[in-house]
Image (cartoon, grey):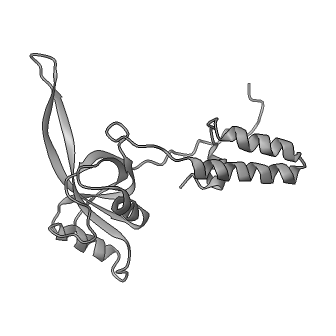
Amino acid sequence: MNDSSKPASPPEPIETLDAIVGFFATEPRRNAGNDADIETESEAEQSDVDDIPKVFARFGVEHYSRNPDTGKIVRLEPTFHSLVAHWEAAEIIKKKFRKGDSFIAQGMVKVSKKTGKEYFEVKQIGHNTRRTRYEVDRSHRTRHLAEQRSTTDRASGVGQERAATSAVGSQHQPRRISPSSAVQTGIAR
């Protein structure tokens, strides 16, 4: 039972954006090409800055339906849409994605003022783990956490032996990171 006379503050709302699961139908490119309506829209928003990293592409979304007679899942024709990405998302797409790659992206659906067509503006993007095989390299994060722990241990007066044991143990055991420590280690956005 809470004996406090202060009412509990409401929890902070969870920030959400739209998300899509799709595949690159075209090679990501730095200019809009046939998607000139998107480039015009982006340029209007960023009118005086031409050196912003930008990427444009067409992407497909797969659709499925259950056959009412057989109960089996039937793959339908994909639908195709446009996307645009700026800044870090654009750099990630150019560096890590090619035509045909499957992805999960977070962002916003926008409508071109010029043509009235929808496009997806990517804020964050990553490979779809259900469709892409890859290895995760945690060596940088592990070293950073080990260095941070040893610095904290030295500052708090804990011996070097514990710091060394902590650094060795952290390489083999995953650690859950709280939101506050994630910001300190650079994991959070």
Q: Is residue 41 left or right of residue 88?
A: left
**Where residue 4 appears, x then y in whole percent?**
77, 35
**Quadrant hosting residue 8:** top right
At x 24%, y 72%, the residue is: 31
What count of labels does the image hold? 0
Q: Is residue 163 left or right of residue 20?
A: right
Residue situated furthest top in the rendering: 70
Residue situated furthest bottom in the rendering: 48
At x 57%, y 52%, the residue is: 187
| Above/below status of 99 relative to 33 | above
Query: Quick check: can you spot residue 113?
Result: no
**Where residue 75 appears, x then y in whole percent?**
15, 32
Q: Tell me the quarter of the image containing the N terminus.
A: top right
Residue situated furthest left in the rendering: 69
| Above/below status of 53 relative to 49 | above
Q: Nearer the viewer, residue 30 or 83?
A: 30
Q: Is residue 45 left or right of residue 116?
A: right
| Above/below status of 98 relative to 172 | below
At x 66%, y 53%, the residue is: 144
Query: Quick check: can you spot residue 136?
Result: yes
**Quadrant hosting residue 72:** top left
**Where residue 180 appears, x then y in whole percent?**
66, 49
**Where residue 99 appears, x then y in whole percent?**
23, 54
At x 31%, y 39%, the residue is: 131
